Amino acid sequence: MAPAIETLRRVFGFDSFRGVQADVVDRVLAGRRTLAVMPTGAGKSLTYQLPAVMLEGTCVVVSPLIALMHDQLRAAEAVGIRAATLTSVDENRAETIERFRAGQLDLLYVAPERASGEGFRNLLGQAKLSLFAIDEAHCVSEWGHDFRPDYRLLRPLLDRFPDVPRLALTATADAHTRADILEQLGLPQEGLIVAGFDRPNIRYAITPRENTTRQVIDLIAETPGPGIVYAQTRAGVEKLAEKLAAETGRPVLPYHAGLDPAVRRRNQAAFVASEEMVIVATVAFGMGIDKPDVRFVAHAGLPKSIEAYYQETGRAGRDGDPAVAHLFWGADDFARARQRIGEVEPQRQPGERARLTALGALVETATCRRRILLRHFGEEPAEQCGNCDNCLSPPAAIDATVTAQKFLSAVFRTGMMFGTGYIESILLGQSSERSLTNGHETLSVFGIVDGEEAALIKPVARALLLRDALRANDHGGLEFGPEARSILKGGATVALVLPPKRERRRRGGKSG
Ligand code: ADP
Ligand code: ZN
């Protein structure tokens, strides 16, 4: 390892390897095929760049995004590594090919679609190769959250050079996706190296949405320092940014793909430079941004998966100081996600569904959030982390099966066409012109809920939507989902997690 350390210090200017970097570099230098699963910011690039410098020949790096490729190229060139990109937007392709043939490149970055072409295969045969580095390797898996068919075409290329070591890299892979990557890229089981995923300085909190704007304003008021608020749509970003700017007294800027590139660059630069700015953004924001002092990441809606959640929240607290990740979710997020899953190709639906279920479990739990996150990434952490909402103020879990049965029964008896508000009014026995004309006041469920149980109706509706016992149609009307029967028949119970009393009163007081 001595020469590796020497190169690390001389070329990269770092004192020591971080985490599993040394293990990965060791394996690669020994020519063994490897899959490195390392969270964002753990220093994946180094694990192929360093061998690329040390080994004779060129390291071919497959990377899916041209923009990121150019960032990496600049970073590599900055420390004096001989590197180039070979993409459709590069005008110096002929020159790059010449440099490659002459053995003058340590790193050659290519997009997967190029890598799979016959011309490229022939080109690779014309010089010595040191390593194949496959970045964002989860793209090769249909089970992964970002499948790219072009990645499937890599295998024949790799197999044409069986003696060139392979290093696959990803930040985000559950056990199933990992196994798939190993198989798809021809890597041995023992080649899997997983870095620790825990980010102990991030405090996780997850709360049902009530008044998103109000909730985010409260969070900002409690959390000084720069922060990112993720909204789901461009329009959502604009609206939220405006309100936060008006009400928080903090500098607030929007960021989404619909903005002029110059504006986007300006807003990003302003955020990176600021010690107090809040940026409201779509998830496009944050890739490749190196801002260590982000103090909070808020989600105003459900992320796409646990992987996405981990990656997005991981932009908080990179400096190791305390930071907060707060997710605000609504049952409609799950309904929409299910609808989207219905629209993807059939073979990808099981993976998508499993991802949503995992996310549901994280959101719904009364137990430690960090434990659920880390177990998702294959770790076996302590029962309690002491730094998430559920550990810090344990919520009360109650059995709400009877209320759930009443709710489902009311949905059924009113013909499965009304929304949560109307069903609630029927259960509470609130007479209205609508309930009168519909003849719903004579139903046995009319007024069947009162007293303390009334407070359970909305959380119950949310829980039923989340676990697919209820589905909302296009007009917001509730229908039975596949899980409804077993709850009605008493085979399945519905446990509700209620936020601790103190917090409930505070929130209730603020929203009126
Ligand atoms: P990833 O690709 O895993 O998200 P990067 O490769 O971009 O992470 O590295 C994240 C940051 O960590 C970069 O700023 C990089 O220079 C730095 N870094 C990587 N390895 C080390 C190390 N051994 N010591 C100190 N800093 C490192
Ligand atoms: Zn915890």
Image (cartoon, grey):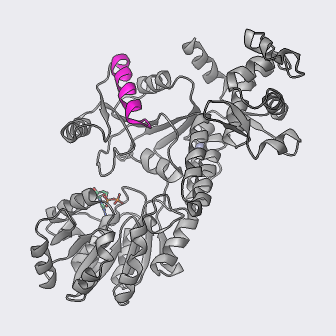
Q: Position of residue 234 (x, y in %)?
A: 37, 35
Q: Name the image quarter holding residue 135.
A: bottom left
Can you say whether 453 is above or below 3 in the image? above
Q: Position of residue 453 (x, y in %)?
A: 80, 22
Q: In screen coordinates, is 2 left or right of 461?
A: left
State yes or no: residue 299 in magenta: no
Q: In screen coordinates, is 427 left or right of 3?
A: right
State yes or no: residue 238 in magenta: yes
Q: In screen coordinates, is 249 left or right of 508?
A: left
Q: Position of residue 22 (x, y in %)?
A: 37, 72
Can you say whether 470 is above or below 7 in the image? above
Can you say whether 396 is above or below 51 in the image? above
Magenta residues, as a range? 230-248
- Secondary structure mostly seen in magenta is helix
Work out whether residue 215 can be spotted: yes
Residue drawn at (50%, 40%) of the image = 203
Residue drawn at (54%, 55%) of the image = 344
User: Closer to the camera, 65 or 192?
Assistant: 65
Q: Name the image quarter holding residue 114.
A: bottom left
Residue drawn at (73%, 31%) of the image = 460
Q: Position of residue 470 (x, y in %)?
A: 72, 38
The C terminus is located in which quarter? top right
User: Closer to the camera, 66 or 298?
Assistant: 66
Q: Name the image quarter holding residue 429.
A: top right
Can you say whether 397 is above or below 75 in the image? above
Q: Quadrant of ligand 2?
A: top right
Residue drawn at (21%, 65%) of the image = 88
The N terminus is located in which quarter? bottom left
